[in-house]
Image: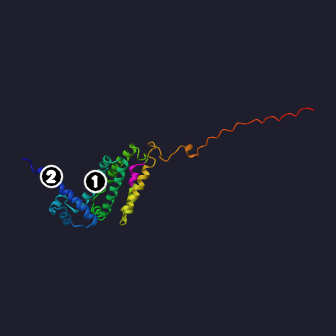
Amino acid sequence: MRSPEPTRRKDALRNRERLLAEAVTAFTRDPEASLDGIARAAGVGIGTLYRHFPTREALVEAAYRAELAKLCASAEELRRAHPPDVALRRWMDRFLDYAIAKQGMAGALRALVAAGGNPFSESRAHMTAALTSLLRAGVEGGVLRADVEAEDVLTGLGGMMFALRAEDKRAQAGRLADLLLDALRFGAHAAAGSRPDARPAAASRPEARPSRPAPPRTRKAPAPRRPRR
């Protein structure tokens, strides 16, 4: 007879995942969201919530870290399922969705930091590692330029987050991501370590047109001599 322990562990894991998903939704909507409401939305009792997350701060931090972990893990999933440049573009979309959730949770995260929590420790390093794997695949596949680092792209994506501060700006952020990807594709044919926009000096000069051969010179026939008288 099988022990009920593995089943209980699976149930506990599912409960935890549901609680985290509902917590992200609730805190994005209202930083002061009720824990009772989160438990009800997850289909569990408040006691189950407290067994997993003894305090409100513990739930906020776990919810934020879960979103970060999903974002970083998706890099490998996308890289295996799509061409490198497509995988990178889809990861950008996931980053923007993560940014929306993070901004929505800003109030809850500020309260967590004020209480002494540090939800952001190592988050940048994890994102940089995930993005580096996508960029490397693109360079090796010849579809992305070789002179860009993950920090450069993260800085660009961070700038897009300002577009998300206003309502209904998600589409604009997506267009900006398209432009960023176009920039990363430009010069993908260049060798690693060289600037993609570099060109030999001779190539920048107009190409010399081949000179046409000069027509053959014709000698004038001598004038006929007049007969002597």
Residue 149 vs 38, above or below: the answer is above
Looking at the rendered structure, the secondary structure element under dot 1 is: helix
Looking at the picture, does residue 221 appear above or below residue 157?
A: above
Q: Is residue 65 shown left or right of residue 83? A: left
Boundaries of the magenta span = 148-154
Pick the residue in front: 189 or 128: 189
Q: Which residue is painted at 13% across and 53% down in the image?
A: 8
- Where's residue 186, x and y in %? 45, 49
- Most common SS among magenta residues: helix
Residue 221, placed above or below residue 75:
above
Assign a secondary structure to mark 2: helix
Q: Compute the Cα span from label 2 to label 1.
A: 21 Å
Residue 162 in view (yes/no): no
* 10 Å crowding of disc 1: few (<14), some (14-19), many (20+): few
Q: Amino acid at mark 1?
A: Lys
User: Taking 122 as reference, is 221 left or right?
Assistant: right
Residue 143 is situated, as x and y percent measured from the top left of the image, at 41, 46
Residue 70 is labelled as 1
* Residue 118 forms part of the magenta stretch: no
- The quadrant where residue 216 appears: top right
Q: What x and y, as percent, mark residue 197?
A: 49, 48
Q: Is residue 202 visible?
A: yes
In magenta stretch: residue 149: yes
Residue reaching furthest to the left: 1
Position of residue 147 measured from the top left corner of the image (x, y, whole percent): 44, 47
Near-viewer residue (108 or 112): 108
Residue occupied by mark 2: 9
* Residue at horizontal 18 percent and vertical 55 percent from the top: 14
Q: Residue at x 42, y 54 (%)?
A: 180
Q: Nearer the viewer, residue 194 or 229?
A: 229
